């Protein structure tokens, strides 16, 4: 059945059609029915003259007065001719979602049948966007198509009209934009929103176990003894130096008065003192050397850790 015949049938059965529609809502007045019928007739003329904008206004005004799926069907056809395919599909769906009343006129049944056929044909050629958001989780991306927010875009087809479209996405603080050209009969129009790849999470620094602090090692008894011997040997060395200097000075006081190791009797006391100083210097020097050597040997032979410990005389000796 042609478009002209369908609307003509609606007009001829106008009273029945409008009466059935009134049963579902507040009953329109006779004046509203007449106005809607007149607008429908005028819409036919404008539609046949391809004055689609004016025809759409007539059918929309008629529908606002008295509901009829015939008016909605013609508005869907005009939407399709204007390139607004998604809006046309929505109007077809409005007709198909409405269960026809039992006393619906024949014009309503024909309008529903035509709407189902035309919707199927239009859905087969309506472009559908397939959007790749890259590294972003789709559930975290908000999407806009031509400036309109598209809620729940991840779980439904993204049907668009043929032509150019602006696609924008927001993922946290990042935004991405793309221009896409949708072509009729191309069911999958792929586009990508180039969100930046997030940096990898920082690699945690390896945990280095802290070494327990090394306890300060107390010096052993052997080491202490060695250092004491070295100290005493050093003191004896200093004493040797002092006594030796005194012996030299004293020797200078009388050496010029003595000849062939013979000195005047008056100098016997000085000679005896000089001999004692010389003997003391020799003894102290020898003692100092022995003590220093013994202290160094004792320290060098003291083990750092462990070793054999021998307690003797209240002292601990480690080897």
Image (cartoon, rainbow, N blue to C red):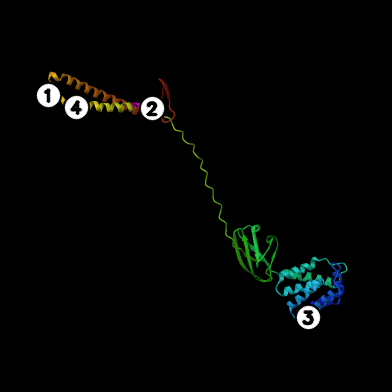
Q: How far, Cα to Cα, is label 2 from label 3? A: 125 Å
Task: Classify 100 as above or below 197.
Answer: below
Please provide percent x and percent y for residue 284. 27, 24
When asked about the image quadrant of residue 66, the answer is bottom right
Residue for badge 1? 257
Image point (26%, 23%), residue name? 283
Q: Main secondary structure of the magenta part?
A: helix
Q: How many marks?
A: 4
Q: Which type of secondary structure does the marked residue at label 1 adopt?
A: helix
Q: Crowdedness of circle 4 by 10 Å Cα count: few (<14), some, many (20+)?
A: few
Inter-mark Cα distance, 2 to 1: 51 Å
Residue 282 relative to residue 15: left or right: left
Dot 3: element:
helix
The residue lying toward the viewer, choosing from 112 and 11, is: 11
Taking the view exactly as shown, the residue that stands out farthest to the left is 259
As displayed, is residue 113 above or below residue 245?
Answer: below
Disc 4 target residue: 249
Measured as percent of width and height from the top left, residue 8 is found at 83, 78
Q: Earlier in the sequence, mark 2 or mark 3?
A: 3
Question: How dense is the environment of label 3, judged by Cα within 10 Å: few (below 14), some, or many (20 and up)?
Answer: some
Q: Look at the picture and state if 261 lies above or below 165.
A: above
- Cα–Cα gap, marks 3 and 4: 150 Å
Q: Nearer the viewer, residue 294 or 275?
A: 275
Q: Which mark is residue 224?
A: 2
Q: What residue is disc 3 on?
A: 45
């Amino acid at each position: 059945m042609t478009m002209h015949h369908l609307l003509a049938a609606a007009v001829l059965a106008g009273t029945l059609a409008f009466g059935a529609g009134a049963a579902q809502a507040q009953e329109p007045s006779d004046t509203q029915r007449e106005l809607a019928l007149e607008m429908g007739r005028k819409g036919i003329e404008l539609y046949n003259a391809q004055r689609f904008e004016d025809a759409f206004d007539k059918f929309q005004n008629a529908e606002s007065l008295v509901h009829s799926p015939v008016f909605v069907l013609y508005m869907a056809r005009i939407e399709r001719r204007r390139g607004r395919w998604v809006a046309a599909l929505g109007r077809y769906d409005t007709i198909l979602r409405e269960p026809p009343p039992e006393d619906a006129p024949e014009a309503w049944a024909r309008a529903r049948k035509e709407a189902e056929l035309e919707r199927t044909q239009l859905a087969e050629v309506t472009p559908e966007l397939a959007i790749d958001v890259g590294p972003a989780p789709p559930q975290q991306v908000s999407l806009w198509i031509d400036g309109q927010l598209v809620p729940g875009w991840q779980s439904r087809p993204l049907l668009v009209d043929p032509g150019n479209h602006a696609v924008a996405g927001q993922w946290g603080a990042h935004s991405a934009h793309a221009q896409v050209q949708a072509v009729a009969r191309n069911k999958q129009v792929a586009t990508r929103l180039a969100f930046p790849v997030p940096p990898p999470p920082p690699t945690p620094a390896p945990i280095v176990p802290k070494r327990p602090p090394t306890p300060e090692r107390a010096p052993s008894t052997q080491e202490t003894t060695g250092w004491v011997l070295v100290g005493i040997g050093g003191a004896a060395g200093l004493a040797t130096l002092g006594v030796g200097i005194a012996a030299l000075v004293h020797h200078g006081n009388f050496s010029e008065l003595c000849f062939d190791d013979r000195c005047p009797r008056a100098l016997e006391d000085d000679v005896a003192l000089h001999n004692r100083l010389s003997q003391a210097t020799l003894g102290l020097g020898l003692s100092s050397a022995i003590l220093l050597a013994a202290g160094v040997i004792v320290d060098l032979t003291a083990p750092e850790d462990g070793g054999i410990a021998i307690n003797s005389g209240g002292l601990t000796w480690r080897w």
